[in-house]
C-alpha cells in the first residue's frame, strides 16, 4: 500500500509544470456596507467597498469593478472595520475569582490547558478579534503549541503572537500557595533569572524556540529585575529584532524599564505625569488593561453580590482617570484586556469590555478603534499587515451592526461577520 502510494505521488510530482493538479481558483469577496472605519486616517467613511482576493485586501473604494465570480456580501448599514487586536491575552490561563493565580497551573495539565485555549480562541474570533498577543502564564511554551495548532487549522482561532514564559527575577508572580509548590510552579510558569548572563540566556532560549515578543516582569511579587538585567534583555532581544514589553503596574518600577529601553509597558496603573511624559518622548506604548463598568458588573454577578449602576461607575472611575491621563500625555494606547479571570462570560466578550472601557473613559469611538487596530498592529510589529484595511493588508475584518460612530457601546457587541485571512470565520 505504501509503495503504491509513493509511486502515485512520484507520478504526480514528475508530470511537469504544465499539469495543474491542485491549484484552487482565486476567491473574491466584495464587502459593501454603509460605514467603513479607516484606521490610518482615524475617520468613519460612508459607502466604501472592500474587495478581497484570497487572504489579502485587493482594493478599497466606491463602485469597484470586480471579477465575474466575486461573492458579494451586502451588509446594509453595518460598519466594516479592521479585525480587532487584543495585545494582552492569556488563553492558557483561567483564574477563579476566589482563588490565587497559581491554582490553575497547579491543577490543570498542559493538555487540558491547550484544549481550553481552543475554546478561548474560538470565542475571540466570535467577538471580532482576529489577532491576539498572548503574554505568558502559559506553562513552558504551551502558547507556541496553541499558535501552531491554529496556524495548522487544528482548531479555529485568531492570529497569535506569543511571548513564551515571562522573564522575571527569582520570584515570578506566584503567591498564596504552599511554599513546597512555589519553586515547581514558578519554574513552570516563568523564566526566572539572576544576573546579566542568565538574563541574556533566557532571551536567547525564547528566541530559539520561536517567540514573537519578550515579556519581562519589571516588578514581580517581591523582587525586581535590576537595571543591568533589563538592559541586557532589551539589547539581546533588539539585536534579534524582537521587541520587549514589561509588566509594570507601579510608577516607581517603570523607571528602570524605561531607562532600559523597553518598547512597551503593560498595565501602568496611575503613573505620574513625568513618567508618562518620558514614555511619550521615547515612543513607549502602554497597554492599559483596566477593564470597565461591564467588567465590574461581571465581577458582582459572578460573586452574587447586589450592586447599583453607581457602584459600577465608582469602581471604574480610577481606570477612566488613568486612561484620560495617558491620552492627555500623548502616550500611544494599545488595547489589551489581560482577561483571565473566570467571570462566566465568553473570553472574547470579556476582552471587549476593556476596549469599551476606553470609550467609557472618554475616548472618541475613532480613538478607541485605533487602540485595537493600528496602534496594536504597530506594537506587534505588524504595521500595514493587520489593523488596517488597505491593499496588501491581510483580509482581517470585523463587521459591526448598529452605528459604531454614535453608539459604540451597543455596536461593539453586535458582531455580524468576522473574516480572518480572507476566510469567513463568524457570521450572524
Ligand atoms: Zn497579564
Image (tube, helix red, strand yellow):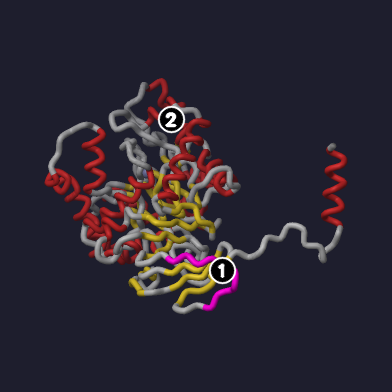
- Cα distance, mark 1 to mark 2? 48 Å
Q: SS for tag 2?
A: helix
Helix, strand or loop: magenta stretch? loop
Q: Residue at x 27, y 63 (%)?
A: 277
Q: How crowded is mark 1: few (under 14 residues within 10 Å), some or many (20 or more)?
A: some
User: Which residue matches tag 1?
Assistant: 70
**Mark 1 or mark 2, whichever is nearer to me:** 1
Instruction: From the top left corner, tell me how far across and down residue 323 is, in percent.
Output: 24, 57
Q: What stretch is highlighted in magenta?
A: 65-74
- Of residues 191 and 23, the one drawn nearer to the viewer in this rendering: 23
Instruction: From the top left corner, tell me how far across and down residue 56 is, in percent.
Output: 55, 65
Residue 67 magenta: yes
Q: Which residue is drawn at 33% across and 71% down?
A: 44
Q: Which residue is drawn at 21% across and 57% down?
A: 361
Quarter-of-image position of residue 297: top left
Q: Is residue 85 left or right of residue 25?
A: left
Residue 192 in view in this figure? no
Assess whether mark 2 and mark 1 are in contact (beta carbons under 8 angstroms). Answer: no
Decide which of tag 1 and tag 2 comes sooner along the chain. 1
Residue 76 in view in this figure? yes
Instruction: From the top left corner, tell me how far across and down residue 95 is, in percent.
Output: 35, 33
Q: SS for tag 1?
A: loop
User: Which residue matches tag 2?
Assistant: 105
| Quarter in which the N terminus is drawn | top right
Q: In this view, does 20 lie to the left or right of 74?
A: right
Quarter-of-image position of residue 66: bottom right
Against 96, residue 357 (above or below) is below
Amino acid at each position: 500500500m505504501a509503495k503504491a502510494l509513493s509511486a502515485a505521488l512520484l507520478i504526480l510530482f514528475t508530470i511537469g509544470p504544465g499539469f495543474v493538479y491542485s491549484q484552487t481558483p482565486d476567491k473574491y469577496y466584495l464587502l459593501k456596507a454603509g460605514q467603513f472605519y479607516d484606521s490610518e486616517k482615524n475617520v468613519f467613511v460612508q459607502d466604501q467597498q472592500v474587495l478581497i482576493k484570497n487572504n489579502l485586501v485587493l482594493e478599497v473604494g466606491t463602485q469597484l469593478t470586480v471579477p465575474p465570480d466575486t461573492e458579494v456580501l451586502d451588509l446594509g448599514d453595518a460598519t466594516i472595520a479592521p479585525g480587532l487586536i487584543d495585545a494582552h491575552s492569556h488563553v492558557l490561563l483561567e483564574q477563579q475569582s476566589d482563588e490565587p493565580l497559581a491554582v490553575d497551573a497547579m491543577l490543570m495539565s498542559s493538555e487540558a490547558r491547550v484544549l481550553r485555549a481552543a475554546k478561548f480562541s474560538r470565542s475571540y474570533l466570535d467577538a471580532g478579534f482576529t489577532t491576539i498577543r498572548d503574554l505568558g502564564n502559559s506553562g513552558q511554551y504551551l502558547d507556541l503549541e496553541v499558535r501552531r495548532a491554529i496556524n495548522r487549522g487544528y482548531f479555529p482561532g485568531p492570529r497569535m503572537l506569543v511571548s513564551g514564559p515571562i522573564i522575571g527575577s527569582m520570584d515570578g508572580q506566584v503567591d498564596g500557595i504552599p511554599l513546597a509548590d512555589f519553586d515547581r510552579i514558578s519554574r513552570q510558569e516563568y523564566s526566572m533569572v539572576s544576573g546579566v548572563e542568565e538574563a541574556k540566556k533566557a532571551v536567547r532560549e525564547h528566541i530559539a524556540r520561536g517567540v514573537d515578543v519578550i515579556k519581562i516582569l519589571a516588578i514581580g511579587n517581591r523582587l525586581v529585575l535590576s537595571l543591568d538585567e533589563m538592559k541586557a534583555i532589551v539589547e539581546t532581544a533588539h539585536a534579534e529584532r524582537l521587541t520587549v514589553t514589561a509588566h509594570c503596574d507601579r510608577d516607581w518600577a517603570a523607571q528602570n524599564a524605561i531607562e532600559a529601553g523597553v518598547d512597551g509597558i503593560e498595565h501602568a496603573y496611575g503613573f505620574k505625569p513625568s513618567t508618562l511624559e518620558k514614555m511619550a518622548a521615547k515612543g513607549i506604548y502602554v497597554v492599559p488593561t483596566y477593564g470597565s463598568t461591564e467588567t465590574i458588573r461581571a465581577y458582582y454577578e459572578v460573586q452574587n453580590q447586589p450592586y447599583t449602576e453607581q457602584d459600577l461607575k465608582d469602581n471604574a472611575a480610577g481606570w477612566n482617570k488613568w486612561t484620560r491621563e495617558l491620552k492627555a500625555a500623548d502616550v500611544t494606547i494599545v488595547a489589551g484586556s489581560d482577561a483571565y479571570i473566570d467571570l462566566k462570560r465568553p473570553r472574547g466578550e470579556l476582552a471587549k469590555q476593556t476596549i469599551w472601557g476606553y470609550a467609557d473613559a472618554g475616548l472618541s469611538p475613532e480613538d478607541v478603534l485605533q487602540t485595537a487596530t493600528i496602534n496594536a498592529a504597530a506594537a506587534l510589529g505588524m504595521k500595514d499587515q493587520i489593523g488596517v484595511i488597505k491593499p496588501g493588508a491581510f483580509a482581517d475584518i470585523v463587521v459591526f451592526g448598529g452605528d459604531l460612530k454614535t453608539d459604540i457601546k451597543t455596536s461593539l457587541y453586535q458582531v455580524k461577520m468576522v473574516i480572518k485571512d480572507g476566510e469567513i470565520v463568524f457570521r450572524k
